[in-house]
Image: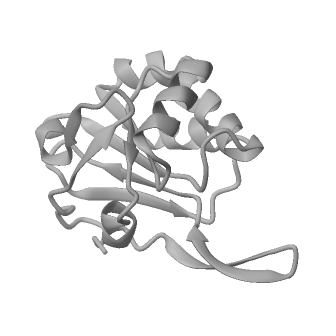
Amino acid sequence: MPELGKKVPKLQGVTGDGSTLKLDALKGQWVVVYFYPKDSTPGCTSEAQDFRDLYPKFLKRHAEIIGVSRDSVKSHANFASKQELPFPLVSDPDETWCSAFDVIHEKVLYGKRHMGVVRSTFLIDPDGKLAAEWRGVKVPGHAQAVLDAIA
């Protein structure tokens, strides 16, 4: 797991449009990597819409957004299309990205314990170093807080 001020790991993954995204190819700009539990669920849809609606403001601050979940490429393609998402969603079925950022933890849903993605966001500076992190994110106001963190 990257520490604040340290370089983030070199990761790559397949996005909803079938292309390969390499995290280190985005050096030179801010990068927001947000992890979410599941495509097309209420909280995850709200979060994606909030990042979508603020996307032009992120671009003005030279920032790219990447959403990551364990859903399939096909699921991401459908979700991105339905929500008109202008940024890539990385499919992480083998949990490479999730493990690198340590976002899989025990959760309790309806009294049952299971391992799942804890909603988390990471801000990477133009040098490829971790600048900020948010864990156990509550969706309302979160995308704006991330935007505000970019100088």
Give how far across and how far down residue 143 sits, in percent. 58, 38
Q: Residue at x 70, y 54 (%)?
A: 138
Q: Quadrant of residue 67?
A: top left
Q: Is residue 86 above or below residue 100?
A: above
Side of 23 relative to 95 (left or right): left
Q: In the current view of this chain or complex, which residue is farthest to the right?
A: 110
Q: Quadrant of the N terminus?
A: bottom left
Nearer-the-camera pick, 97 or 3: 97
Q: Quadrant of the C terminus?
A: top left
Q: Residue at x 23, y 31 (%)?
A: 19
Q: Quadrant of residue 135?
A: bottom right
Q: Is residue 5 above or below residue 69?
A: below
Give how far across and how far down residue 82 sits, in percent. 61, 20
Nearer-the-camera pick, 127 or 10: 10
Nearer-the-camera pick, 74 or 6: 74
Side of 48 relative to 140 (left or right): left
Q: How many marks?
A: 0
Give how far across and how far down residue 85 sits, in percent. 51, 22
Give how far across and how far down residue 44 sits, in percent. 65, 44
Q: Residue at x 39, y 32 (%)?
A: 16
Nearer-the-camera pick, 147 or 69: 69
**Colour scheme of the rendered structure:** one colour
